[in-house]
Amino acid sequence: MYFPGYTVICAFFPGKDDLGRMERLLLSLAFSVIIVSLTGFLLNFTPWGVRLLPCLISISTFIIAMSLLAIYRRHKLPPQDQYAPFLELEIRSLPQLPVLDKIMVSVIVMGVLVATVSCLYCIAFSKPGERYTEFYILGENGLADSYPRELEAGKEEKLIAGIVNHEQRKITYHMTVRMQNIVKSTEGPIILKHGEKWKETVKISTNYPHEKLKVEFLLFRDQESKPYRTLHLWVTVHKKTVGGGR
């Protein structure tokens, strides 16, 4: 709530006459809110996500980098012009500010208070992120619109099966391919940590013609006996061709 913005202000305004003490304090608080919020926003688009350790490392790295920059710029000034950190606050100077400055100070203070209360509320009542597993089937060329609609009896067709773990923990998966309630193949154990992916080629075939055959893909999680995710395709199985014609 203070140090990220404080180091930025020190880096850009290294002179003691660049800003007043009250301005440094308020701008440090305001910039801290902006920097921490922006850090969380950017981390949300990374594999690490908005979690305690990535946030701590990112903000600490930012503070150290800006502190080094502030020290460098401060030492380039004559000693009498360098800004020295202060401990006391001149609250009595606040009533002497112009009306516009008072309004700006009030808005910044209210914004900091709202941000602080919001952060405390999120920490106290935060819920774990959504937990789910991606389970998908693609055609042989990796597209969702290239599923086989027709099979030839006795001939294998290839599909691509994919699993992505978003369960916030390590999961052991098993995948079963079933036709007419008959298990044709099983994949596993597939052990994935949070964020890890699995993608493999799966072959399907049958020896008997069928008008509308349901091909099921069942995904089991850990030791659960009931399928966690299910997918299916409807295919028509034709007789085995002789001489290239049906």
Image (spheres, rainbow, N blue to C red):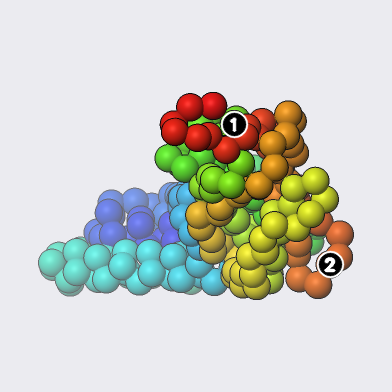
Instruction: Tell me residue 67's x, y (percent).
Output: 32, 69
Mark 2 or mark 1: which is in front?
A: 1
Residue at the disc numbered 2: 224
- Give me the residue at 27% from left, 65% from top: 70
Query: Distance of mark 2 from mark 1, alpha carbons?
Result: 33 Å
Helix, strand or loop under label 2: loop
Horizontally, residue 18 falls left or right of residue 46, namely left
In the image, residue 108 above or below residue 246:
below
- Residue at the far right: name it: 226
> Which residue bears the numbered disc 1?
150
- Seen at 51% across and 39% down, the residue is 139
For the point 50% across and 54% down, which residue is it? 201
Q: Is residue 100 above or below residue 84?
A: above
Query: Which badge, 2 or 1, is on the more N-terminal residue?
Result: 1
Q: Quadrant of residue 5?
A: bottom left
Is disc 2 in contact with disc 1, using a CB cutoff of under 8 Å?
Answer: no
Q: Residues within 10 Å of mark 1 (few under 14, many from 20)?
A: some
Res. 37 visible in picture: no
| Image quadrant occupied by the C terminus | top right
Residue type, mark 2 in image: Glu
Q: Tell me the quadrant of the picture where the N terminus can be found.
A: bottom right
Asked where in the image residue 214 lies, by quadrant, the reply is top right
- Residue 46 spot, x, y in % from top left: 46, 55
Residue 223 in the figure: left or right of residue 18: right
Within 10 Å of disc 2 (Cα), the crowding (few <14, some 14-19, many 20+) is few
Residue furthest front as drawn? 243
Q: Of 207 and 102, which appears nearest the observer?
A: 207
What residue type is disc 1 on? Glu
Q: Is residue 61 visible?
A: yes
- For mark 1, give the secondary structure: strand
